Amino acid sequence: MKRIILIGYMGAGKTTVGKALAKKLGLMFYDLDWYIESRMRKTVKQLFDERGEEGFRKIEHNMLHEVAEFEDVVLACGGGTPCFFDNMDYLNRQGETVFLKGDPDTIIKHLRMSRGVRPLLLGKSDEELLAYINESLALRTPFYEKAKHTIDIMPMDSFDKIADTVDEVA
Ligand code: S3P
């Protein structure tokens, strides 16, 4: 039984890498945000708007316990998932956790490329965005670093190349 769990900051590439890896290994792919959206029939943004971040984290925690029980899967978590409740310890018990570690420049580059709506980043100027990323990345990194494996991702790395590296370590 194989269960590979990708964690890391928003824009690290968890979803794109996860999809490529699942295809390569013939595993099912799950993205926790997408799972939450289909189970709740609401977007992540709607859940933030209606219940605040605290409400969203409770839902995320509950849904994580459903999705991280599935077997032979690649699971991409949300950027905040490992940093609330005992989620990170739980994830380490459930499978091969891999931290996709990107520096702020790589993260910003990826965020510009991806069209996802991220409530925590909305309405921020470029300057505010960089300050927020630096600050929250510093707070979150100790949680991410509990992963069993860490991969440093560089701005020029393709997502397929990162997927190959995840396959090698996990
Ligand atoms: C969040 C990351 C998002 C999503 C939500 C909160 C975060 O997922 O779960 O907007 O706190 O970092 P991605 O990392 O897939 O963007």
Image (cartoon, rainbow, N blue to C red):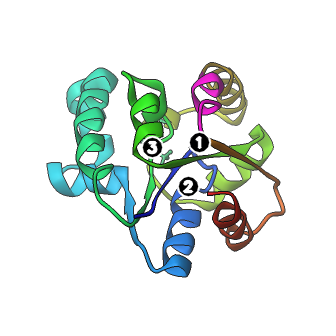
Query: Vertically, is 158 above or below 104?
Result: below
Disc 3 Cβ-to-ligand 1 distance below 8 Å: yes
Q: Look at the numbered disc 1 and give the secondary structure of its residue.
A: loop
Quote the CA–CA distance across marks 1 and 3: 8 Å
On-image quarter of the C terminus = bottom right
x then y, percent, for residue 150? 70, 44
Disc 1 Cβ-to-ligand 1 distance below 8 Å: yes
Q: Please rate how many residues cluster around mark 2, counting C-alpha atoms within 10 Å: few if below 14, some from 14 to 19, many from 20.
A: many
Q: Look at the numbered disc 2 and give the secondary structure of its residue.
A: helix
**Residue drawn 39% across the image and 30% down it:** 87
User: Residue 145 in magenta?
Assistant: yes
Disc 2 marks which residue?
A: 14
Residue 46 seen in this snapshot: no
Disc 1 marks which residue?
A: 8
Give the residue type at disc 2. Answer: Lys
**Residue drawn 31% across the image and 44% down it:** 44
